[in-house]
Image (cartoon, grey):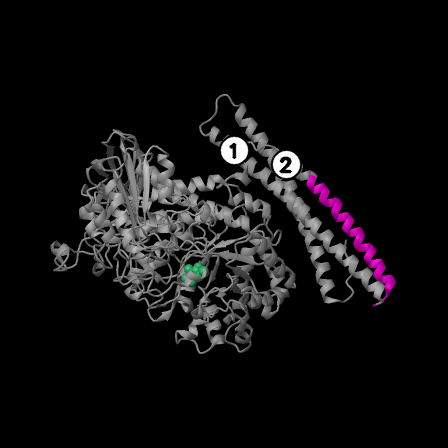
Amino acid sequence: MTNSGDGEPGRDHRVRRAAEARQRADQARERAQEARDRLAELRQDQSRLMRHDERPTGSADHAERAGALADASIRQARRAAANAAAANRASADVHDSAARLHNQLAEVGIGDPDEHRRQARQHQRDAAADRVEAEHDDELGEHFAIRPMRAGAEADGEVADPVEGDMTGDADSIRARVDELLSKMTPAEKAGQLTQYFYFRLPAGADAEPALGLEVETQPRTVEAALARGEAGSLLFVTDPAEINRLQRLGVDGNRLGIPLLFGFDVIHGLRTIFPVPIAMAASWDIETIERGQAVAAREARAVGIHWAFAPMVDIARDPRWGRIVEGAGEDPFLGAAVAAAQVRGFQGADLAQPDRIIAGPKHFAGYGAAIGGRDYDEVNLSEYELWNVYFPPFRAAVEAGAGNVMTAYMDLDGVPAAASRWLFTDVLRQTWGFGGFVVSDANVVRNLVTHGFATDLTDAAARAVTAGVDMEMAITDPAYAHLPEAVQGGAVGEDVIDTRVRGVLEAKLRLGLFDDPYVDEDRARSVLADPAHREAAREAAERSAVLLRNEGGLLPLDIDRLGSIAVIGPLADSQRDTLGPWVFDFDLGETVTVLDGIRRAVGDRVRVDHAAGIPVVQRVFPSMFDMFGGNRPADPEGFEEDTEFARAVDVAAAADVAVVVVGEWQNMIGEAASRSSLELPGRQLELMQAVAATGTPTVLLVMNGRPLDLRWAADNVPAILDIWYPGSQGGAAVAGLLFGAASPGGKLPFSWPRTVGQVPMIYSYTRSHEPDNQSRRYWDEASTPLFPFGHGLSYGAFDYADLTVEPTVIPTDGSVTVSVQVTNTADREAPEVVQLYLHQRHGSASRPVRELKGFQRVVLPGQASRRVEFTIGPDQRRYWSTTERDWVLDNSTFDVWVGGDSTAELTATFTVGRTAIH
Ligand code: BGC
């Protein structure tokens, strides 16, 4: 198997790779054997436990766990065998090509022909031996192709399978492997590993984005040249598995050490199966649904070869003028933290080495959501009090959930570009929270340190970012990190800093198992992307995220049997692209179910359905940078005539038994670089809604949005308002289910819904300050309360809260209380409710908010059913960062608790911390 190189670097390299492949194959076989032994033991354990007639408490659990572990071991063993076979076959291929090379050299007479022929024969023998080994591995794999012990636990077909174990080796072996690679890398190769390139293949004639320095024609060529030099660590923006395999091959072959590429992408709310936008998912307050959504997204992404999502976006957003509010979980740190952690778990599972999982990259660290004036990219000035108490908690939760990556923000935070903040990336993220993954810059951000008027040139920019703790630079072309070798040579950065950064990136690649198998199976990718279970998960998520804002007189749900005709009005009602929402690129428009489609399918030929757009598509004043991607720029149908169409819409509504009007923002009006100076409905939508309502036909308003819009008129005049957000691929099917009562809405607002733009930022968790009784009259021209409060959302049930208890009512500083409440659904039908708990500290080392969310539980109660719901309030819920102490504090104080269905809940109780110690 070993082969003496004859001094040619290319051949040496290939021979070394053959030896490495062989070594890995041996290791994989050993692991397969270990897994088999473990399996035998576990099986014995399980049957012993099953034989017990008198099972000790917990034995069923034990048996279940043993069964699960056994299943996991079977899968591990099978994958180990498959890896071993693949490695042996790869090794055989390398020997074959080395043999061919020696024969050619012998023929053309370079060097000693006899020696070449001898070497060729040796390589052929080695290749044959490897193929025999591969067959043994196949046999071993077949041995494990038995039914798993736990019913339905076949990993490959499951969305979120808790597979245990790490196929890619333990921490020590990963460290050793990284050490070895580092010792062989040149400075340019190291800088390459720290560089991530966009790879843009845009449609011919697409308008490039000049602000990004993007040249459509040359960009892909520049990136491929970097791959050929072995000087790129990661690519983003490729989603086609064949293209990913092609680029991966260029990357692996171009790199002297065969280091594979990491592929990253904005997997924000689904890859092919599009889920509701993130703000909608947060509005479900349904942690399992949120986790499952990202597990589906991860499964699709990994199947096409994507290893890493630039998600979740966990920026707190309190100003809806900022378009990126749609990507996050809204205004509240407690809800934001729960949603952030759920998403990380969904993407990554328990272990990145599991199949179908990808690295999660919470972003944008930190404070990006507080852009001044809600203007994307503009500066942020936040006190440490706000950072620690409001903006950091979702990041911390994501880190604690094990996020493998964190992305920087674009803007200046308190006068320092966030991407060059040592405080953020070293002191807070790594030293305080113990983050062990790698940090990526946002797009072009390291170069932009020069643009900000901060760094002198690209070398200085690279040095400052890398020293602050930014491991990888995301670049379109011409990365600043290409100047890192220069920065090291000039003494601006120590080589050890570079090695630490490279280590993070290589470890991620090893943990993902990319060195063993960097390519994807394109056939499998096709079948995963088509999985109907994914579409069903998306439908259910859309159903759970809709928020019923108003339902006067119980207009909803509509009774199909009593309807003769429905008018579906508005241009968004039948727009597939808008139904999906922003931040998706790999969608399949053909299978997207619009509101109109969903209604038509639900009623069949029982009810007549007429559609009229009524008004034209509204265009942005300044186009969106996302318009350069195909299908993103909306257009009117041919021959559209505005006045005729408006009149037709009103006629159709007048003639119908019920009118369903869809209003909102077109998807390119929200998201990145989509800030607004107003919250009004764009175009003539208000006028259209008013004209429809004036016909006297009962009207249901559906709002398609990612931020609160000015609905003051509707809130007074339209009986039913359902916020459907951008509901995704199956949105229309979910909306129809809600309209006709197959399911009940149960979502709750993750932000306070302002009346008008002049009120923003508007939050429910303000402090009492001066004259709190006048709080609702801070403006003389408009109430300073929201139109709909944080946490608001109705259902087809009716929930009553009673008998609130807190026990004990006096606790020591580090003690906890149990809060318990009786929740009753007084309606006759089943419905979901999110029970929310709010807390207020009356006095202490800071003035604390009037209320803060500190607990929530989503329950589904049958009609007339009642349940007790319990929460624990301990030090974690009471602790806050105090400006007085410049530290985290736990004050002794009196606390008010409210429990109810939104942030205005009135049922209240108190407890005291610290007066008397309880033992
Ligand atoms: C956004 C990031 C995104 C990146 C890559 C940037 O403009 O701010 O959130 O992940 O582009 O698409």
Q: Residue at horizontal 46%, vertical 71%?
A: 447
Quadrant position of the C terminus in the picture: top left
Magenta stretch: residue 127 in it? yes
Mark 2 packing: few (<14 Cα in 10 Å), some, or many (20+)?
A: many
In this image, 555 relative to 505: left or right?
left
Magenta stretch: residue 437 in it? no
In the foreground, 488 or 232: 232
Note whether residue 485 is visible: yes
Q: Please state which amino acid type lies under the numbered disc 2.
A: Phe
Q: Quadrant of ligand 1?
A: bottom left
Q: Residue at horizontal 25%, vertical 39%?
A: 658
Q: Main secondary structure of the magenta part?
A: helix
Q: Position of residue 14 (x, y in %)?
A: 71, 60
Q: Position of residue 304 (x, y in %)?
A: 54, 50
Magenta residues (range):
110-138
In this image, 178 relative to 856: left or right?
right
Tally of numbered tags: 2
Mark 1 packing: few (<14 Cα in 10 Å), some, or many (20+)?
A: few
In the foreground, 909 or 246: 246
Q: In the structure shown, which secondary structural element does the residue marked by tag 2 occupy?
A: helix
Asked if ligand 1 lies within 8 A of label 1, the reply is no
Query: Label 1: which residue?
Result: 152
Mark 2 against mark 1, which lies toward the viewer? 1
Q: Which dot marks residue 144?
A: 2
